[in-house]
Image: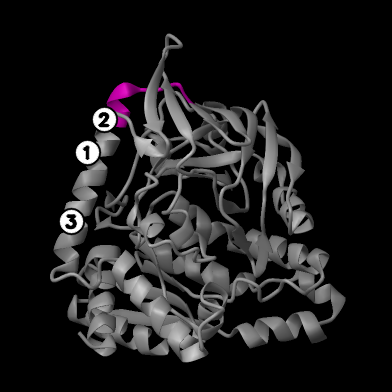
């Protein structure tokens, strides 16, 4: 198939298997400006699926960078609350949410980390009303990627720009199954396999997960009424969607106060235009009390200081080391892909879908149950072929769950 044929298939996959756009539904898209060709194809397929209106908000990284070079100091405490309030209103009205990513992982690496932290905090605060509807799974939503020149250069620095961009597109098509004969059918089968795994985990009712490996000796307690999720899930509006394409993970909710021990990252983290490498932290009673990194430590520390919940876990996810993304041998420098190459954890906001009857609870009741609350949700990778994980039952029995990064049961 030609690139255009694959791009169109990818767009159709996004609409049908990712968002699963319903007739009469609006669609709100955010995307880098380089994604115009992909967005146009997605828009066509969305209207074919019955969408009433497709609205796209584009972002331009050069404009973002211009703010840090020329913006007044006070501007870094400002965010477009009017825009995010409008997005939240769209979601309350039933609009589907599609996020397309493809940012330069190192866009802000040379900028003042304090300004970056202030801008991120302001944005996260303003975005909170919309984010809560997404993390509460009130709507069908999906995140996909678009290859861009800057991102391709970070992944394939040794290749000429055009070849690097083409190589990244090939990797995206392969990892998302867009290059298969029936991508939508392939995702249905994949989601079925992930659902079988979550069914087994939900039946075991583990009270904790125990990790051991190089630089890692960590216990993650789970909330008592946790739910494992993975693959296609039903949003509260009744629409079945795949929130992430690609996705190889099964995930659930850690208890915000029951995480103890040390853990080392196994892949770099790209966060808001900065690289953080060699993360090593120690948890006590659910909170990070020591943090180290070989690169980007200042950025990492400011990230976990965003608010009280930013230094606690909101998600724990299991991914086999043999996943297609890991098998590609590519470090994508993008969490959407790299988190599906390795088991991972996320500091910050928890997903309500991982707590039984969470939609009936107040914020205070969720916190009492162990759910974490924060302005951020940042995944980072801790799995590898050297990590062993046990599931700990209610009576304290440790059962092999993963060995050398692969499922043991």
For the residues labelled 2 and 1, say whether their Cβ atoms are less than 8 Å apart. Answer: yes
The quarter in which the N terminus is drawn is: bottom left
Q: Which residue is mark 2?
A: 200
Which quarter of the figure has residue 363? top right
Tally the numbered discs: 3
Measuring 73% from the left and 58% from the top, which residue is drawn there?
A: 295
Instruction: Give SS at disc 3.
Output: helix
Image location of residue 114, percent across then percent down: 82, 64
Name the foreground residue: 194 vs 232. Answer: 194
Q: Is residue 53 above or below residue 334?
A: below
Viewer can see residue 55? yes
The alpha-carbon separation of the residues under discs 2 and 3 comes to 19 Å
Measuring 51% from the left and 76% from the top, which residue is drawn there?
A: 156
**Left or right of residue 199, residue 256 in this image:** right
Mark 3 vs mark 1: which is more N-terminal?
3
Q: Which residue is mark 3?
A: 188
The quarter in which the C terminus is drawn is: top left
Instruction: Give SS at disc 1.
Output: helix
**Left or right of residue 160, residue 116 in this image:** right
Measuring 58% from the left and 57% from the top, which residue is drawn there?
A: 128
Mark 2 vs mark 3: which is more N-terminal?
3
Which quarter of the figure has residue 207? top left
Q: Which mark is residue 155?
A: none
Q: Is residue 165 above or below residue 111?
A: below
Name the foreground residue: 270 vs 352. Answer: 270
For the residues labelled 3 and 1, say whether their Cβ atoms are less than 8 Å apart. Answer: no
Q: Residues within 10 Å of mark 2 (few under 14, many from 20)?
A: few
């Amino acid at each position: 198939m030609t690139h255009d044929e694959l791009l169109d298939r990818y767009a159709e996959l996004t609409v049908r298997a990712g968002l699963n756009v319903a007739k009469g539904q609006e669609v709100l898209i955010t995307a880098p400006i380089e994604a115009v060709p992909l967005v146009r194809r997605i828009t066509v397929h969305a209207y074919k699926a019955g969408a009433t209106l497709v609205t796209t908000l584009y972002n331009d990284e050069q404009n973002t960078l211009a703010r840090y070079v020329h913006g007044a100091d006070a501007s870094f405490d400002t965010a477009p609350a009017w825009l995010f309030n409008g997005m939240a209103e769209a979601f309350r009205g039933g609009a589907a949410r599609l996020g397309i990513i493809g940012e330069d992982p190192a866009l802000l690496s040379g900028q003042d980390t304090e300004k970056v932290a202030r801008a991120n905090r302001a944005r996260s605060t303003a975005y909170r009303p919309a984010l809560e509807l997404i993390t509460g799974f009130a709507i069908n939503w999906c995140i996909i990627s678009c290859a861009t020149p800057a991102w391709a250069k970070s992944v394939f620095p040794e290749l000429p720009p055009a070849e690097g961009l083409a190589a990244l597109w090939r990797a995206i098509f392969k990892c998302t199954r867009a290059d298969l004969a029936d991508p939508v059918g392939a995702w249905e089968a994949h989601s079925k396999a992930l659902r079988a795994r979550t069914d087994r985990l939900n039946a075991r009712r583990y009270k904790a997960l125990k990790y051991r490996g190089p630089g890692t000796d960590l216990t993650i307690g789970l909330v008592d009424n946790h739910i494992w999720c993975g693959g296609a899930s039903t949003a509260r509006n009744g629409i079945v969607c795949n929130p992430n394409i690609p996705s190889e993970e099964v995930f659930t909710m850690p208890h915000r106060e029951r995480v103890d021990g040390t853990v080392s990252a196994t892949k770099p983290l790209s966060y808001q235009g900065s690289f953080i490498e060699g993360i090593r932290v120690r948890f006590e009673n659910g909170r990070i009390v020591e943090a180290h990194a070989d690169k980007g430590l200042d950025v990492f520390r400011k990230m976990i200081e965003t608010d009280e919940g930013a230094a606690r876990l909101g998600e724990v996810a299991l991914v086999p080391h043999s996943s297609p993304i890991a098998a590609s041998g590519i470090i994508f420098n993008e969490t959407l892909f790299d988190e599906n190459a390795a088991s991972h954890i996320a500091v910050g906001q928890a997903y309500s879908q991982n707590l039984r009857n969470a939609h009936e609870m107040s914020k205070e009741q969720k916190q009492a149950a162990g759910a974490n609350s924060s302005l951020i949700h940042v995944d980072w990778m801790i799995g590898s072929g050297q990590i062993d994980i046990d599931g700990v039952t209610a009576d304290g029995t440790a059962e092999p769950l993963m060995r050398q990064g692969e499922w043991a049961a």
